[in-house]
Amino acid sequence: MPELPEVETVRASLVDRVRGRRIVELRTGAFEGVLGPLGVDATRAGVLGRTILDVARRGKYLVVALDDGTGLLIHLRMTGRLQLEPGGRPPLRFEHLAILLDNGDELRYADQRKFGRVLHVTPETIASLDGKLGPEPLDEGFTSGWIADRMRRRTGRLKSVLLDQRVVAGLGNIYADEALFRAGLHPERKASSLGAEEVERLHAAIVDVLREGIDNRGTTFSSFADGHGASGTNQQYLHVYGRGRSGSPCTRCGQPLSVVVVGGRSSHHCGSCQPIDQ
Ligand SMILES: [Zn+2]
């Protein structure tokens, strides 16, 4: 599932190629639900003739900003892919939407599981994202003080709190597990039990794993690709995510890794490097 580094990789791979381009047509496939409740006709009427000013990211959302202040709000969810193709190429596998641009390129959305959406939204909806999401973890507003404050107010487990998008925008299962390993913190710790030094370690670990994920152009297990179809390489550098079930050895201490389910999400960790009793 695409998290901040994957969505950022898609954004960065597309923005210079679509900025300034005018939308000349929309083409939908069999699954028109990709456009959400607005539907095909209203979406087409809203975006045709509009020029793309920018491709921005907020948490796990992409926002294709248009010249009338509206935008296309895109959430890739599980298996969504946004890809730029020259016109005339055959459809992508599981392609549901193509946004045709004035230079002949097509911005195409494909999604095997069909959970993702491409929604034409108002300026107010775009602005409201800030109210629903915590700070961007790679921006200055994301500090250890912010984390400490959120953790103090919570009765939940550390892993669950980290996945709350109001606490850290863009963090998901992969990078949360990697950050907890790097910080030496057990996913089932009570969030409110963290000491100041532990919060500092967690803050640094979150920033580091996300930066590395972006540097490695995202984590690809099955379907993730950038805006030109290229896979990421970050899966080669993961320490715990996906390795707990097989009991693979910890890269730090050599003990077998484990999995525990926290808030319904599998949490891969090292019981030795991330002790529960601290
Ligand atoms: Zn270990």
Image (spheres, rainbow, N blue to C red):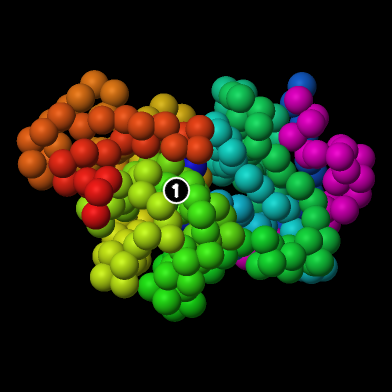
Q: Quadrant of residue 204?
A: bottom left
Q: Position of residue 168 (x, y in %)?
A: 50, 60
Disc 1 marks which residue?
A: 157
Taken as a whole, is the magenta stretch helix, strand or loop?
helix
| Direction left: furthest residue | 254
Observer able to see residue 16: no
Q: Nearer the viewer, residue 221 or 71?
A: 221
Q: Position of residue 230 (x, y in %)?
A: 40, 39
Q: Is residue 114 above or below residue 83?
A: above
Residue 39 shown in magenta: yes
Q: Is residue 127 left or right of residue 218?
A: right
Image quadrant in which the C terminus is located: bottom left
Q: Residue at x 78, y 39 (%)?
A: 35
Q: Is residue 20 left or right of residue 150?
A: right
Q: Residue at x 41, y 27 (%)?
A: 222
Q: Secondary structure at mark 1?
A: loop
Q: Quadrant of residue 232?
A: top left
Q: Residue at x 29, y 23 (%)?
A: 245
Q: Position of residue 1 (x, y in %)?
A: 49, 37
Q: Nearer the viewer, residue 19 or 258?
A: 258
For disc 1, the neighbor class at 10 Å (few under 14, some 14 to 19, many from 20) is: some
Q: What range is drawn magenta here?
A: 31-55
Q: Quadrant of residue 96?
A: top right
Q: Residue at x 66, y 67 (%)?
A: 130
Q: Amino acid at mark 1?
A: Arg
Q: Is residue 138 above or below residue 227?
A: below
Observer able to see residue 198: yes
Q: Nearer the viewer, residue 252 or 57?
A: 252
